[in-house]
Amino acid sequence: MVAPLYTTASGLLFHAGKILVVTIGLPARGKTHISRALERYLRWMGVKTQVVSLGDYRRKILGATQKVPPDYFTLGEKSPETQELRKKVSAGCEKLIWDFFEGGGQVVIYDANNGTKAARQALAEKFDKAGIHVVMLETICDNKEIIENNIRSVKISSPDYRGWDPDKAVEDYYKRIQDHEKYYETIDEKTWPFIRIINVGEKIMLNNIQGYLQSRIVFFLMNIHNRFRTIYFARSGQSLIEHSYKADADLSPAGWEYAERLKEFVLERRGKSLKERGIDPHERKLVIWTSTHRRAHHTAWPFLATAQALNAVEGLPVAPSPEPSSSLPTSSAGKTAVSKVSGAALNVKVVEKPQMLEINPGIWDGLSPEQAKKYYPEDWERFLKDPYSFRAPRAESYHDLSVRLEPVLIELEKEQEDLLIIGHASVIRCMLAYLIGLPASEIPAIEVARGDLIEVVPASYGVHSQAFHFWDGPGRRGSVDPDVTGRDNINFYENYAEDTKGKRNLSTPEPSIIRG
């Protein structure tokens, strides 16, 4: 998390007070996706945030669509029974909001349609009188493709349409939208600060946004989208010098074998996933991010070499293929190097990011856990008490690393293509924790073993995560290669979770689903 390591008497951060974000928009306009993404980001910043979803609360109290009166989802005249049910649900959601604020929460995102001026004005006035800042967040979408994708990928898979024929569910949901359109009133009142997002990030309009935290909310919303994509994580291959942070060594022979196997497995897995969704893998670009260390960006070379070879078969222009002894353009401090091979056969882009360098172990560089405990007993005790916040002399803490990675996380939200992140274990831990929504205290204990591919698919209600095992060669879990100086497990500051049998294992021999 990027929040400063301090607390306040009120429990609130950034002198921002308490904020109620009220979503506004017709059904299937991306409100839930935006709400959950914003919740994840604010929690990463250390802000106590919660989404209160009217739809989820209604399903919890009343059940699915089949169990509510037929006029429940219209905005016109309603039966007395329906009016009472809607009041009951709205009052219940408001109570959840009050309870969260009274319990020390700072930001609530109220995920509901709020389609009439009178209803949202009444809601805003209640909380404004209590000193809570109200920000209206309207999502407008006139792109029929986005609306159709939202309905098919999110809405008809909800409990409301369990057991329905997909086409009939889509037809029924369109009727619900049409009923709302008759009474929907776009926000034009300037009484409250508001953010208007058009086509999920295509355009954004603002009114009277004030303060640091509200500005950070806007900054985040300017970088999100809801296009389907898959994010893959894999550790870099084994290098010739494994135990040194400072040594920027090339891959070992086993490391090159690992890189080739990673390429084969990713392309096979990605091709299968895209075909299942009716997408031609050749029509989608694969973007690869690495650090500027040789072992990271060299692990991506087989992807470029394969793309060049396939494109040569297709008769497309071919650049010289990288060789293990040569070197791609490396980035200078603060800059990013990009290598790209495009064509009909395989479209790959490799980007080196200096912010993705592994955590700096400082004076613990090259030490085993036993050596660190022996030479620095007091620091060792502090480290065991708080592995996330502890910073060894001349080192980085995981908190420092999280702060360094924040710009990369924003780029992660903005990236619309399939993404493969070839990185160091400490970096992957932080990025996984952000996507899955794990607390900061668990970041150092996430096990990221070399030889496992972690697949993350962002969805409206969280993420779907699977781990696939594809490699058992040297360099996995501290195994020794006679051609390599040192052992993986010596660099325990980087590999803390593996060396201490970390409590959070996201790497499994068989595929497993982890919902966050």
Image (cartoon, rainbow, N blue to C red):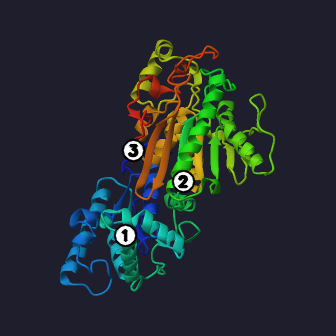
In this orientation, does residue 508 appear?
A: yes
Residue plotted at (63% across, 43% down): 289
Dot 3 corresponds to which residue? 514
- Find disc 2 in the rendering and name its residue: 274
Q: Is residue 100 left or right of residue 491?
A: left
**Is mark 3 in CB contact (under 8 Å) with mark 1?**
no
Q: Quadrant of residue 107?
A: bottom left
Mark sitting earlier along the chain (2/1)? 1
Secondary structure at badge 3 equals strand
| 158, 7: nearer the viewer | 158
Q: Does residue 13 appear anywhere in the picture? A: no
Q: State whether residue 349 is above or below residue 202.
A: above
* Nearest the eye: 233 or 108: 233
Q: Residue at x 32, y 58 (%)?
A: 101
Point 43% across, 68% down: residue: 151
- 232 lies left or right of 433: right
Q: Position of residue 510 (x, y in %)?
A: 42, 36
Per the image, the residue denoted by label 1 is: 112
- 78 in relation to 479, above or below: below
Q: What's the residue type where badge 2 is placed? A: Leu
Callout in the foreground (2, 1): 2
Instruction: Name the spot of residue 28 as percent of width and height, x first.
Output: 43, 70
In the orientation shown, which residue stands out farthest toward the front? Answer: 313
Which class describes the residues within 10 Å of circle 3: few (<14), some (14-19), or many (20+)?
Answer: few
Q: Amino acid at mark 3?
A: Ile
Q: Position of residue 503 (x, y in %)?
A: 38, 31
Mark 3 or mark 1, earlier in chain: 1
Cα gap from disc 3 to disc 1, whole angstroms: 27 Å
Q: Position of residue 441 (x, y in %)?
A: 41, 37
Upstream in the sequence, badge 3 or badge 2? 2
Query: Marks 2/1: CA distance?
Result: 32 Å
SS at circle 2: helix
